[in-house]
Image (cartoon, coloured by chain):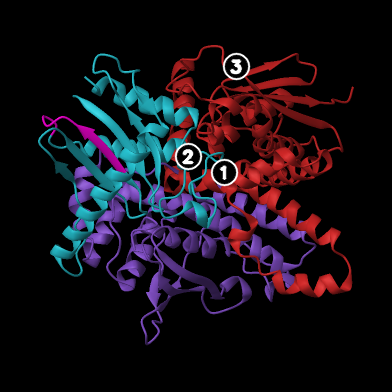
Chain colours: A purple, B red, C cyan
Amino acid sequence: MSANSANISASSAGSKKSLKTFSDDIWKNKTAKINAELFTLTYGSIVSQLCTDFERDFKKVNSHLSAMGYNIGVRLIEDFLARTALPRCDSFTQTSEVISKCAFKIFLNVTPQVGNWSSSKDTFSLFLDENPLSDFVELPMDAVKELWYSNILCGVLKGALEMVQMDCDVWFVSDVLRGDQNTEMRVKLNRIMKEEIPAGED
Amino acid sequence: MVDSGLASEVNEHQRLQLQFQLFQESLPKVDETVYRMLLNEAVPLAIGVERSLNHLEEDSTDQLETDLNSKLTFESQELGASHKLLQEYMTADQDQQIRINTRLENIGFQLGQKLSQLLIFSNNPNLSFKDMDLLSVMKFVCRDVWKQVFGKQIDNLKTNHRGTFYLLDYNYKPIESFTLEEDLSDQEQKMMEPFLHVPCGMIRGVLASLGFEKEDQVTCQATLVEAPDSKQAGASAFAKSVSFNVQVLVER
Amino acid sequence: MAIYSFWIFDRHCNCIFDREWTLKSNQSSGTTNSKQNEDTAKLLYGMIFSLRSISQKLSGEGSHNEIRTISTGKYRAHILCTASGLWFVLLSDLKQEDLSHVLRYLYSEIYVKTVVHNWFSPVDFAESDSEKRGQGVRKIRNRSFLANVERFLGPMVN
């Protein structure tokens, strides 16, 4: 199994450069791939159907995209951990590195930039210059103000992080599909969830 | 002289094939697991949508509406875990089930149409869309479409040459890991049903974009079947074999 | 290889799977998810929990130090703790020094494929707060998980 090499790399995953190399290796050698365009088309069909179902009430579409993402995130995290053998992160800063350089890389083959840290270091932004969900997508006029097209990503991150005991809020602040300068997601750590202990052991 | 003419034709074809292959490999990719999860989660999504649409229909008085508005920012958890939503399908009434499945068919249909366009313009030297008859279109679905979406081709295509086709996939990938507990195994067929509406819609979408677009011209129904040989290429004992029955009304 | 039993604990302190082999000579012997193992499960959980939390305190801040094996005079427990709070545990005879590759396979090839990728299976086995903190009773029962565990671990029982 990939265990040994994964363990050796994982323990030095603190260093940014080695995390990048580690993730590149997993993407190149241990990931089955499909054409991104197929992914874009499938997601587009799903969003389109939701818009029809809710008669263009984009707030509801956003909610359902996020809920869909959440259900994917709680499963995807196990895939991620099985493939990378990474342990819990020591800090939220390290979490941001693992999300941007490792998770996005091995699943979507993109590496968003991390930035815009809050002064209390509990919130950061992910800047996606590439987004396979929305390649070649153009939003119709009525959607531009209210639809967060890639909202599924917010749910995926929220669900995945919850499984590693981080209660986070994740939301979009801008999207090039809406005519904004860039596509920016914000991730805020509300609290680190306490590990459960058996009832009666307090 | 004839020989060398043929040889250069073959070489040209090989060159185009190699070029096409290299081009395909250079295209941007994403992880297959993520794609599979997106496809699968579409089913609980469709069920969740049905639930929220019905909810809103029941409580249509003004008072309740304001109440609902404040609750409309769904907590993802409120909609429910994937497996719970799937259980709701079993207890939904027939109309609801039909609406859920139609939703999934529509998603598949759109995907089929767009995918067709994508493949048509991909310069695949093995495909020629100029004089495609129905059988060629079905072969296109079985080989190229299935390979793109599910990583493998349809295992067996049967036809009566009069518009009826059976596409047999002995290890339909999206649901290959799905199993229930021992005592619920008789419900498996029914529970898998919604998962088969996306590929059915996709088949119809491809056919529609290649000339078979008249209303109700194409119908597609999928059923789980027994694989003829349970030792199919690396498939586990729990591989799901699916038969897609496609009926196309051909004008005379 | 003399594996005695296989356990999975989740982040709600619950044992969500147990398989104990009672006869070395018969790989289909023993129990699966049985009530008799409830007390053993709780003791096993407690032992791992305590040693894990003490050893993490001993290692100090900022480093993750997970327990890998616990040996007694009669058996060895091999443990894989995932960042998602799952513990995969194998009890074996003392001859087995390192079964981490077996645990990895159980996680990435069996658990992920038959539970995580199975839309009919929950990934969170506690359906309400009353089933958390070690008070839950739900188990992994789906057929392909069970079959894969038997096929993989069965030959290692003797």
Stretch in magenta: C88-96
Say whether residue B20 is left or right of residue A22.
Answer: right
Seen at 33% across and 45% down, the residue is C42
> Where does label 1 land, which residue?
B122
Q: Position of residue A156 (x, y in %)?
A: 50, 59
* Chain name for mark 1: B
Q: Position of residue A173 (x, y in %)?
A: 55, 77
How far apart marks 1 and 3 lie (CA) works out to 36 Å
Q: Which residue extends farthest bottom?
A: A119
Name the image quarter holding the N terminus of chain C.
Answer: top left
> Where does label 3 land, which residue?
B226
Kindly tell me whether residue A177 is visible in this rendering: yes
Name the image quarter holding the C terminus of chain C.
Answer: top left
Say whether residue C29 is left or right of residue B66.
Answer: left
* Chain name for mark 3: B
Residues at badges 1 and 3 in contact (C-beta under 8 Å)? no
Residues at badges 2 and 1 in contact (C-beta under 8 Å)? yes
Residue A55 within the magenta-colored segment of the rendering: no
Q: Name the amino acid, label 2.
A: Phe
> Where does label 2 land, which residue?
B20
Instruction: Say what secondary structure mark 1 lies in.
Output: loop
